[in-house]
Image (cartoon, rainbow, N blue to C red):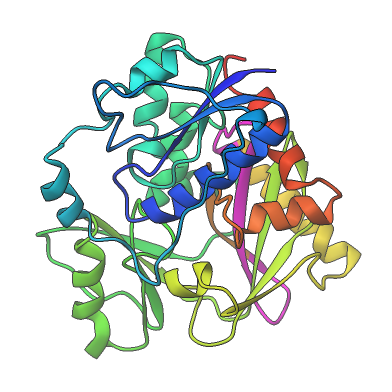
Amino acid sequence: MMKIAVLAGGFSPKREVSLSSGAMITNALMERGHEVYLADSYLGIPDGEEIRFYSLKDGMKFSSHIGSSAPDLEQLKRKSGFRGILGSRIMEVCMQSDMVFLALHGGAGENGQIQAILDGYGIAYTGTGFEGCLKAMDKHLAKLLMREENIPTPEWRLYEKGAQAEPFLFPCVVKPCGCGSSVGVTMVDGEDQWQQALEAAFSCENKVLAEAKISGREFSVGILGGIALPAIEIKPKSGFYDYENKYQPGLTEEICPAGLSTKEAAHMADLALRVHKTLGLGYYSRVDFMMKEDGSLYCLEANTLPGMTPYSLLPQEAAAAGISYQELCDAIAKHGKGA
């Protein structure tokens, strides 16, 4: 059994999702016999507070709530007064651990920055190394690499803040280049919506993609230990698979295993594995697809640290493959980088 530090929260629009993932992961790891410390990587650990790794016998149970919209990061920054990546004493708890379980989503936790810091200290951690994180998080770079490997992905154009932004083809999807959970994403049907969509995406970061909108069915495929898990189909009851539909119960129908023919499922699994390999991802990931009516598949993106909340896709896919949530967390922890 290991001493495991679970890093969650962070400075990202997905921090509430991450805190929920972190709470569930911590509970699951304790149930598997590990000693675990859950920390908010951005807010850090107060001076004087004991760093205590909890086990199941301590009777601790962690929980966290996800709101219907992304948190106000500027308010968080003003309240904390912190401007860095890792909060006070986070490296202290990491160095006391056998493994750092990264339950972070988006921001420095998923773009490779925190992975690079841990590499510099020789600290073992879960998921993908900094290079693969960088490739996957930058949607423009990921799509360039996919195109080089003849992996189908929707046509797109990159825009930079302050530069002239001629409209892309319509309908399209405007999204931040390196965010996630559909934060800052707008479906654009015509030129009258273009400028407002750009402003929403640029409010998140300085690089934005406009991507051809693919109409059809939406799927996701998890990868675990070099094996593709059963695909899951995502069917929002209204609108598209935005932040609220992802994390509020009852707003999206998720079907796993997805209703696919054997041939379709095999093709999707093969493409997911090719994306995983092309981007140089680690022990686990999740790859998202759209399928047109004619059955043609398009890869949207890959996630190096997929959500692990009660409503997340990867745990549902693992369950369909006969892997419990506790077994999933345990396997990820035992196959961390540097373990």
Q: From what the image shows, is residue 265 above or below residue 284?
A: below
Q: Please tell me which residue is depicted at 78% across the width and 46% down the height of the picture.
A: 324
Residue 99 lies in quadrant:
top right
> Which quadrant holds the C terminus?
top right
Q: Is residue 182 magenta?
A: no
Residue 58 lies in quadrant:
top right
| 336 with respect to 100 (left or right) | right
Q: From what the image shows, is residue 116 above or below residue 166?
A: above
Magenta residues (range): 278-297
Residue 295, visible in the rendered structure: yes
Residue 78: percent from the left, percent from the top?
11, 49
Decide which of 315, 212 is in the foreground and name it. Answer: 315
Residue 32: percent from the left, percent from the top?
73, 31
Q: Please tell me which residue is depicted at 23% across the width and 70% down the height of the picture.
A: 200
* Residue located farthest toward the top when viewing the structure as drawn: 122
> Which quadrant holds the N terminus?
top right
> How many discs appear?
0
Q: From what the image shows, is residue 22 above or below residue 333?
A: below
Decide which of 128, 280 is in the foreground and name it. Answer: 128
Q: Please tell me which residue is depicted at 58% across the width and 46% down the height of the picture.
A: 24
Q: Please tell me which residue is depicted at 39% across the width and 37% down the height of the picture.
A: 109
Q: Is residue 288 magenta?
A: yes
Residue 134: percent from the left, percent from the top?
41, 36
Residue 333: percent from the left, percent from the top?
64, 28
| 109 with respect to 324 (left or right) | left
Residue 150, visible in the rendered structure: no
Decide which of 233, 32 is in the foreground and name it. Answer: 32
| 156 with respect to 32 (left or right) | left
